[in-house]
Amino acid sequence: MNCKGFLFDLDGTLVSSLPVVERAWLGVAERLNVAPQEMLDFIHGKQAITSLRHFMAGQSEEAIKKEFDRLEQIEATDTEGVEALPGAIELLNRLNELKVPWAIVTSGTIPIAHARSKAAGIPFPEVFVTAELVARGKPEPDAYLLGAERLGLAPSDCVVVEDAAAGLASGLAAGCQVIAVNAPANTPELSRVDKSLKTLQQLHVSYADNIARIQFD
């Protein structure tokens, strides 16, 4: 597979944050009287405000914003157990060494995304697309389109690396090549992606003439 740049999701792709996410959202489920598994099945890969509007349908934007602010504070300060996923730091360092353009494109807000990146010790990107920058979150294509634009690349020249169904759908809708990593076997979008990996350790990059060449174990 060849490309000119990479667009990485954060949570579940570069960083293991599932315990933090589930702790925070189980608290939301309790406050909103929503079945815990129903909450967890819905939220992954989506902007928090999208999930809250879904589960708080009919409530005022003021009430939704209040719950959002509480959730953001919890998720931005609770980083216990957050760590880089296998191969993530090595891959990003390799891209920096080769001077391959890359960005992080996340459904999280700036406070959450920056806190988790720092806690996991991953290299910080020059381009960091967060929830505040797009009107429509994943699975809509906006975030990955913006990521490609800020790298100065066409979407078709970018490879999206994602774990969640909403993110995979977003990358595909943006017209990018898509690699799934750590995605559950029952994820419907897996039949549509270009490559599915169990770990980033299977992905190897070389770079020449502004083209990144990707090989897989």
Image (cartoon, helix red, strand yellow):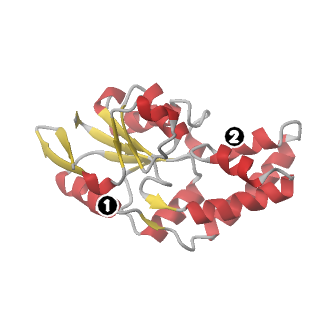
113 in relation to 120, above or below? above
Crowd tier of the residue under label 2, counting other residues whose Cα lies within 10 Å: few below 14, some 14–19, many 20 or above? some
Tag in front: 2 or 1: 1
Residue at (42% x, 30% y) in the render: 191
147 in relation to 94, above or below? above
Q: Residue furthest left?
A: 208
Residue 129: image tag: none
Residue holding disc 2: 50
**Amino acid at pointer 2:** Thr
Front in this rendered view, residue 122 or 41: 41
Q: Residue furthest bottom?
A: 80
Q: Quadrant of the N terminus?
A: top left
Image coordinates for residue 13, horizontal then vertical, percent: 43, 52
Residue at (60% x, 47% y) in the render: 44
The answer to whether 164 appears left or right of 55 in the picture is left
Question: Could you tell me if residue 170 is visible in this image?
Answer: no
Residue at (88% x, 36% y) in the render: 58
Residue at (61% x, 33% y) in the render: 136
Crowd tier of the residue under label 1, counting other residues whose Cα lies within 10 Å: few below 14, some 14–19, many 20 or above? some
Image coordinates for residue 93, horizontal then vertical, percent: 26, 60
Residue 87: image tag: 1
